Amino acid sequence: MQETTPIHFQTTRVLPEYDVFIHTSDGTRIPAHTSILASVSPVLENILDQPRKHRSSERIIQIHGVPSTAATAFVGFLYSSRCTEDEMDKYGIHLLALSHVYNVPQLKQICIKGLSQRLTVENVVDVLQLARLCDAPDLRLRCMKLLTNHFNTVQKTEGWKFLIKHDPWLELDILRFMDESETRREKLKKHKEEFGLYAELSEAMECLEHICTEGCIDVGPYNVEVDREKKPCKRFSTCQGLQLLIRHFAMCKRRVKGGCLRCKRMWQLFRLHSYVCQQNDSCNVPLCRQFQLRMEQEKRKDDPKWKLLAKKVVSAKVMFSLSLPKRKRDEEMRVTMDSRGIRHFGYNEYCNNRCVSC
């Protein structure tokens, strides 16, 4: 015997008498209105447009495969466009299936969002299978990520054991996704490490200009008094170390013979600066113009490598600048503009006379 379940639909509309009944698997009858169902779901509209065998017979729609309470929540959404948290907790999976079968996009999006927030290691396999059947790529991706991050725990669940016995293709899809995720993580890690290196070199280039134009604690242009009682430079984390490297470079006796690793490092910084420098003859950094002239006169085989390195260093500087707040970015630009035009380094003449190939 079928039981008719009265429903209190949350709507302010004045409704006529019921003219259609939804029958569920357990025999429950849910009264509804054809105009409401047809206006929300094109699938239900097509069902309702089919001719009846007898005009006097009731309009009946069969919704099987889900609990009657889930079907009631589904019909309630068609009237009110609302789904409570309690209904999502209890019937989220069933409502997603119904929203896909009967083409109710608004409910489908609500279910995808609700199920994404309720994913656990216990239900992730079931939700993943449903997401694949219901064409829900966002929900599928969330499930895949949770599976990847907690795979050892998911392997112990009943859902996973059922999957490997009955759906080997989905298991293969999951394992392939995990392998690709690991590859992406390795590439991202490598990219971050490279970007960090280029960012450090970019800061070293700025710091070099800062020392050679403004001067700092220990090193500065010959016409600028350095304040030796000044606190350590706060603008650049590499400033103190670079000043020590410059002082060593200026006094090292092994530099010309090429036997000093610290001097080689300084030569490389000077050379890299010449590739990124845009000031031409007005640059205050030692050897800048000499390196640029040498590049013009000699088409060295390793020039493309240096150009590529300089390009990546400049890109890192731009990316870092864009990541700063606007006020900080404007301040950096102002300081850079104000620092131009100061005279050359005290030992610039010395370096120019002793210039050798890198």
Image (cartoon, rainbow, N blue to C red):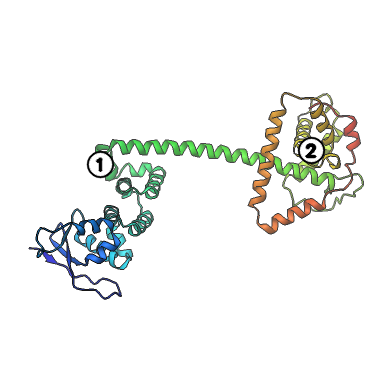
Q: In the picture shown, does residue 269 fall above or below 70?
A: above
Is residue 155 visible from the viewing direction of this image? yes
Going by the numbered disc 2, the residue's amino acid type is Leu
Image coordinates for residue 195, horizontal then vertical, percent: 62, 40
Which quadrant of the view contains residue 148? Answer: top left
Which quadrant of the view contains residue 89? Answer: bottom left
Instruction: Identify the residue shown where x is 29% and y is 42%.
Output: 160
Q: Is residue 19 left or right of residue 81?
A: left
Q: Say which of 340 and 38 sits in front.
A: 38
Q: CA distance from mark 2 to mark 1?
A: 65 Å
Image coordinates for residue 84, horizontal then vertical, percent: 32, 65
Dot 1: what SS?
helix
Crowd tier of the residue under label 1, counting other residues whose Cα lies within 10 Å: few below 14, some 14–19, many 20 or above: few
Going by the numbered disc 1, the residue's amino acid type is Phe
Is residue 218 visible from the viewing direction of this image? no
Image coordinates for residue 170, horizontal then vertical, percent: 32, 39
Q: Say which of 146 and 18 sits in front.
A: 18
Q: Which mark is residue 162?
A: 1
Q: In the picture shown, does residue 115 fall above or below 306?
A: below
Crowd tier of the residue under label 2, counting other residues whose Cα lies within 10 Å: few below 14, some 14–19, many 20 or above: some
Q: Quadrant of the C terminus?
A: top right
Instruction: Look at discs 2 and 1 and give the one toward the viewer.
Output: 1
Q: In this figure, which residue is indicated by the disc labeled 2?
A: 245
